[in-house]
Amino acid sequence: MVTLDDALAALDTTALNIKRLDDLLGSLRREHGQVDIWGRDSPAAGAYRRLRPEFLAFAAALPEIDGWRITAAPPDIDTPGDLPSGRLTHEIAEYKSRFAAMRRAVIRPRLAELAHRIEDILQRPIVTKAETVDEELLADLRACIAELEKLSGDEIEWGNLRRHLGFGMAVDIRDIRLRDWPPVRERVQSLVHENTPRPILVGDLAHLLGATAKARAAPANRTLNWAALDPAAFERLLLAMLTSSPTYEKAEALTNVAANDGGADILAWRAFDCPLSDRVRQRVVIQCKRWITRSVNHVDVDKALSDMRLWFKDEPIDVLVIATTKGFTRDGIARVNQNNGLAVRPTIEMWNASKLENLLHGRYPDLLSRFGLKAESADHPAGKAAKKSPAKPLRKPRGSARPRRRAIPAGRLVSGGRIYRTGGSHRS
């Protein structure tokens, strides 16, 4: 079985042979021009005769690509009528194009894997609250970047990423996450998808018109399978949304999931331009609640507020975001509105499942596949629940609407703490 290292070694050797073939072709053209001037007995003719067999040997050493290889050869100056033609130049250009496509096809899966791995490392708490760097994650990041550089060759402009990675301080990791990595990631994605047709589900786009007309009355199913995420993955998803947004800066995970962090999971700065003032910056804390069966109530809101004021009393928080994969109860919403009506810090924002689903579908569709989220189908439990028929209304009891009397034993304790000392009846 051919490994990726073996394939890369073969590709590198082929690239060297192609470069040597190009050099030989340039020398042959130069010497052939001199032969046309000075004749077949000139020193240029002797040099041409020495270079031609070498060119043929390198051309024969090039491996086939999908059964195709270079068959044209330089003209033989000793054969009358054998004149230069554009066929050889065309075939060399064709071989280069096929070779580049083949190399991209070989490295494409590994490029995508490395990009996802680097993205995952940068979303983890590589910089701790004490401004120290996790050395294990840093070493993993350096190894991934080195392999990515080896695979991509000269295809990527690295900017300051190498320098920041070499220093490896907390401020350097933030610069990599916010400034250096995003343009490199875009270039890697272009290499992964370059010259690769994207799959389309239909053969004739006109069929979409009929399909959308039939389904126009039914809204699109945008519900996501949140059960596919564990709490740590949910935090990484929100961190990825923040780092991909131009409005947020310096987004970072504070501590490990379920740690004693006062409920603060992600810290970020929200920055935007005000047309009547200077640039506005807000300190934002996101509390991540990957809850499937329970909604956020007023007790949860009060606890989040008290935790924020306790843990960030020296550095007040402007905005507290409570992000949940479920929703908010009525008393929870009322408590949030009550707090925001007081005009004190922090103000509270509610990110429920519906808001997150709209954001992911509308602005961050690439994160759906990266985190294994997809719209729930009819086979999913949530989809089945939506398809159940509505409950039938309760039937009114027959006969009189007056309550039925039932006997209460003497001395029996009933609700409200009342004790019946004698037998009798009680309205139920």
Image (cartoon, rainbow, N blue to C red):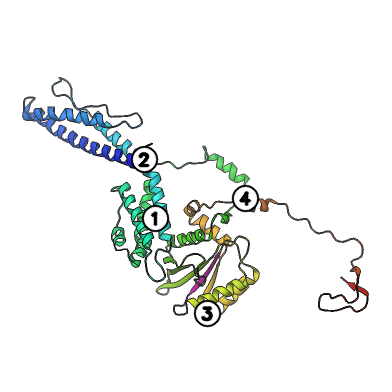
Check if mark 2's residue and mark 3's residue have beta carbons within 8 Å: no
Query: Label 3: which residue?
Result: 344
Task: Write the residue at 38% across / 54% down.
Answer: 185
Secondary structure of the residue carrying tag 2 is loop
Residue 247, image x and y in percent? 43, 65
Check if mark 2's residue and mark 1's residue have beta carbons within 8 Å: no
Residue 422, image x and y in percent? 93, 78
Query: Label 4: which residue?
Result: 380
Crowdedness near tag 1: few (<14), some (14–19) or many (≥20) residues, C-alpha within 10 Å: many
Q: Nearer the viewer, mark 1 or mark 3?
A: 1
Residue 8, image x and y in percent? 32, 41
Crowdedness near tag 3: few (<14), some (14–19) or many (≥20) residues, C-alpha within 10 Å: few
* Cα separation between marks 1 and 3: 39 Å
Which badge, 1 or 3, comes first in the chain's sequence? 1
Residue 160, image x and y in percent? 29, 60
Crowdedness near tag 4: few (<14), some (14–19) or many (≥20) residues, C-alpha within 10 Å: few
Quarter of the figure with the C terminus: bottom right
Q: Please give the range of residues in magenta.
A: 312-323
Q: Considering only vertical position in the picture, is 69 above or below 336? A: above
Label 2 amino acid? Thr
Which badge, 2 or 1, comes first in the chain's sequence? 2
